[in-house]
Amino acid sequence: MQAIFAVTFPFFALVLLGYLAAQRRVLPEAAIPGLNMFVLFFALPCMLFRFGASRPFGQLIDPVLLGIYGVSALLMVVFSIALTLQRVPGDSGVPLKDAAFGALVATFPNAGFMGVPLLVGLLGERAAGPLIGAILLDLVVTSSLCLALAQMQPSRGSGPGAGLRDGVLQDRDPQASDAHDSVLAAFLRALRGALSNPLPWAIGLGALVAASGLALPEPLLQIIKMLGDAATPVALFTIGAVLWRAGQHTHTATPVARYLPLALVKLLVHPLLVLSAGVVAQAMGLAVSHFGLMVLVLTAALPSASNVSILAERYGADNGRIARIIMASTVLAFGTFSVFAWAMGAGLP
């Protein structure tokens, strides 16, 4: 456990430094979006391109591992929405849009900004293969599904037959369009948004270069290396700054009961669900290596992705609740992630 803490502590410490720098105004708030864009469009794509170009395609897209992770993600979305929509006495309930973002924040780990450097640092570069497959699935499928569900809710004041209201399916007007068309249209819109993210393209381009055997010019490789090397510290620092900024832009109080359970679902239920799915797959005779399953479990054990709060703000969801889930999961993950890493045998010879 001490060896695991020796690896994880610097990563979470950099997140804390970013938070404190923004809080103390050493890093101006106006600089945070630019820092985030640098990581998203320059540093992290170069890091992922290098990993994609250095690994065989079969290590990036393992259908069994993708199936395990994908099934777990879908179950997590369903479970999180059901948990959020469950009303308790005295509680007015949560709209479907906020429940969908709750599912996204409980299912979407911070695998890009935090997971890639942390897991590679903990397990070595071969962890990049299963991790990149999980990142692709989350970026393309999980996020698109949750954003599509968030857009199914009509605006307040819509008349009878509007479809979904406060998470409950209402009687529809016979002249209204079919609900499945609405879901499909929302999913396609969300999918187009996901495909505008540079990370999947960086991975795909790296895999294409590896498959073609093309040798890039040395000066270009050096530029990619320099930008990729900047990804780890800047990404972690940016997470902390983004968390502070999200807290500054939340103007409503959120009861602990509305955010802590989902933070614990993210940190505990998600990795245990992935582990259970892997054990079931092994019992069915599928080829699931312990190392690949360990990478997926630790990916699921990461805290919630910090950019979900930005999406929640953009889509008009309860950003205060989402920001608190992300903050709680990030703070608690230092302990829970380390325990999962120890239990799975990370760092052992």
Image (spheres, helix red, strand yellow):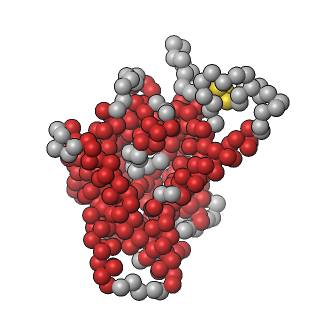
Q: Residue at x 47, y 86 (%)?
A: 213
Q: Is residue 84 above or below residue 58?
A: above
The foreground one among 323 and 129 is 323
Q: Residue at x 74, y 38 (%)?
A: 179
Seen as rendered, the residue at the extreme top is: 90
Tell me if I can see residue 316 in this picture.
yes
Residue 122 horizontal/vertical position (percent):
31, 62
Q: Quadrant of the C terminus?
A: bottom left
Q: Is residue 6 above or below residue 313?
A: below
The foreground one among 64 and 189 is 189
Horizontal relation, residue 316 to residue 220: left or right: right
Q: Residue at x 31, y 52 (%)?
A: 34
Seen as rendered, the residue at the extreme front is: 30
Horizontal relation, residue 179 to residue 142: left or right: right
Q: Is residue 70 above or below residue 309?
A: below
Q: How many marks?
A: 0
Residue 339 horizontal/vertical position (percent):
34, 48
The foreground one among 126 and 245 is 245
Tell me if I can see residue 120 in this picture.
no
The foreground one among 114 and 244 is 244
Residue 80 horizontal/vertical position (percent):
54, 37
Horizontal relation, residue 292 to residue 25: left or right: right
Q: Residue at x 56, y 33 (%)?
A: 97
Residue 117 horizontal/vertical position (percent):
33, 61
